[in-house]
Image (cartoon, coloured by chain):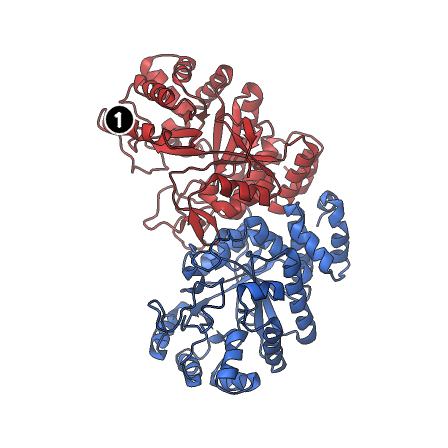
Chain colours: A red, B blue
Amino acid sequence: MSTLSAESILERLLSGSRPTVAEAAELVARGDLISLGMVVGELRRRSAAAGTVSFTLDRTVDLGQACDSGCPYCAGTTPPAAPGAGAEPARERAAQAAGAPGLRQVVLQGGHRTDLPLSFYTGLLAELRHANPGVARVAFSPSEVLTWAQAANHPAAAVLAELQAAGLDAMLAAGGEALPARRPEHRRLLAGPWPEWEAVIAAAGELGIPVIAPVPFGLGESPRERAEYLLRLQRLQEQTGAIAALLPFAPAVAPPQPGEGDELRLADAGDLAPAASPAPAELMATGHEYLRMVALCRLLVPGVAHVSASPMTQGAKVAQVALACGADDFGGTQEQFELAELAAGRVGPMTAPEFARLIRDAGFRPALRDAGFRTVGEFGE
Amino acid sequence: MSQLMAGLLPRDLYDIYEKVMSDQRLGAADGIKLLTHPDLFAVGALGELARRRRVGDYAYFNNAGYINYSNVCVLSQVCKFCAFGKKKGEADGYEFAIAEMVEKARRWTDLGITEIHMVGGLHPDLPFEYYTGFIRAIKEILPSVHLKCFTAVELDFFARKFRMDVGEVLDRLQAAGHGSITGGGAEMMHPEVHNVICKGKMPAERYLEVHRIAHRKGIRSNCTMLYGHIEEPYHIVDHLLRLRDLQDETGGFQCFVPLAFHPTHTELGHLPGPTGWQDLRVIATSRLLLDNFKYIKAYWVMLSPRMAQVSLNWGANDLDGTIREERIYHFAGANTPLEQSGQELAALIRGAGLVPVERDSYYGVIREHALAQEVSA
């Protein structure tokens, strides 16, 4: 079966037609960066895009590395905790982070734990809201909601409603959803079965909880698998309207050791097991492939209003170039990182003025946003 | 460029597109337009078009080692952008003994390196025999390795310090085994910038004259431009056109290397340094204006391997080399790795859709790496 060339597919996208899976896969496999970027730019010119690039001021809180899910990101380095272990220190860390001056949101991250009851998490949200009402709370993912729903024998929507009532402002649809199905043992809890996963997103949409969808890539998926995943997000968005933003990122998976062919395939790590000595982080996903992925998110998931660039994983320079590929958000300042890659040979914490400088340099206007990606004002000098 | 993509170019870049397609030379106004244009991808499309039309889709790297023989420099208080140079007697000043340099080179003998790049500070005391001495000693153990040594600034310094003319300096270095000249020291040629960032350093005219003398002797050289500090777009264009003029005259330049300024630990440390957009606009503008250069280098040490790779789609076609031990920019806070393997560089090139070629010091092909495997959708 012959498919159209990437060029013809781009031409069809420009004329407003929807890509088939085969066409999307062809674009993922062979769309060249410059052409993808040119078409994204043309579509942006035709739209009513505001010309702003948003960001927020945030900190991510590590609730503890213990996890019951056994997913490939950690490759067994994150075993389950003893029942209840580390819960109190996690609460203290969250409270301390949320109290940092000038903060707009905290992002709570941690493993999936079945030993802590849902009431621990609703209690945590309520405490944070009480202590710092101006700091939004972004946390949890569909798979956690499903875990708690199963444990309590409750509908997932009810669990979500409880979390929202306690103070959840936005949810991360995190995880390895793009992992190839041929590695079912790697999906397990994190990916979750699709119908249930989608039902949680739909419930979030009904409750008005904005969902931020990280889009992992470079995990050994084929172009077709990546295309299917993006089209699935587009369909889900059409049905639910719940997804506020996509966040393409390449998880730091070590590339395979050079083998017989002596070929180091950087963006296409064939094995998820970490190598004994990981390659430099810079090489895990190439800048080129990352920028293509940002553009592909724009082209294949047009229903989602925002795409976040990832300065923390790609460095400020490549993230700034991502603004030309259709990204219109820089995520958060992630103030817990003291040594982000700001520019040539310059490391330090990401700050609002630094973000604003990069955004203006690229010809856009910096704007502060809330946890649901609603602009709350332009960022002044 | 396909018809579809040409149709997406903004109107105000269309005349540049037509000039490239009809092999007409671009002018200063075109350069300013490219450096300030809001459509980063359209600028990239033109840079890539020029690269493809003029030199094809090969991108080069070499298997090279770096030795920075000393950081002691009489200009250490002059060049405000430099974190490498130290005054004599300063705690972290160093100079390698010839035996140390030979030892470094010896460790590379089994790695297949084809070139050693050697530059250093303007050392107040070392005798001329030191420079000819390390060249001779390294050539003795690695006779087939090309020694790309010294910037025009060092060569001019040798001429003044050892009371010779530059031609004689070059003759004696060449007799010892010197191969070609590095591009460093050009900084930003326009006096409005030069007088602020390195007042008193050898001026642009002398930089160009040293290269001219070398080219007339048949010695090849590279050239550079330090950008991303206090310059304006017209300073960049001025710099590029001066290089283009000399290249018209001699044809002796091999590649042009735009150098992204690293502010950390320099006297200009209050500056933020160039952004990713600026890096790419400079690469594309260099490719488009320098129509008599085959090779535009994206130097990964300064750009980061990620940005160097992205630069290939904006018109670059050289990623420099494996390097092994770079010191100058690592003093200026470079957080890039100290070396890259040939396989890593080839993978970066292939990942950007170009054909990786390991080259020798004169861009002769040593090995064309396999093309990207066809990925089926």
**Location of residue A264 in the rendering, given as x and y in whole percent from the top left corner:** 44, 52
Q: Work out whether A16 lies above or below B194.
A: above
Q: Quadrant of residue B336?
A: bottom left
- Image: B177 above or below A225: below
For the residue pair A37 and A50, the one nearer the viewer reads as A50
Tell me if residue B278 comes above or below residue A56 in the rendering. below
Give B36 or A227, whichever is nearer the viewer.
B36
Identify the chain of the residue marked 1, using the numbered disc in the image.
A
Q: Which residue in the protein does label 1 denote?
A: A87
Question: Which image quadrant is residue A122 in?
Answer: top left
Q: Residue at x 44, y 63 (%)?
A: B83
> Which amino acid is tagged 1?
Ala
Vertical comparison of B192 with B14: above or below: below
Image coords of residue A349 (percent x, y): 42, 43
Residue name at image x 58 percent, y 75 percent: B220
At 36% from the left and 16% from the top, the residue drawn is A149
Visible in this render: residue B281? yes
Residue B345, position as x, y percentages in the image: 48, 57
Quadrant in the picture for the N terminus of chain A: top right
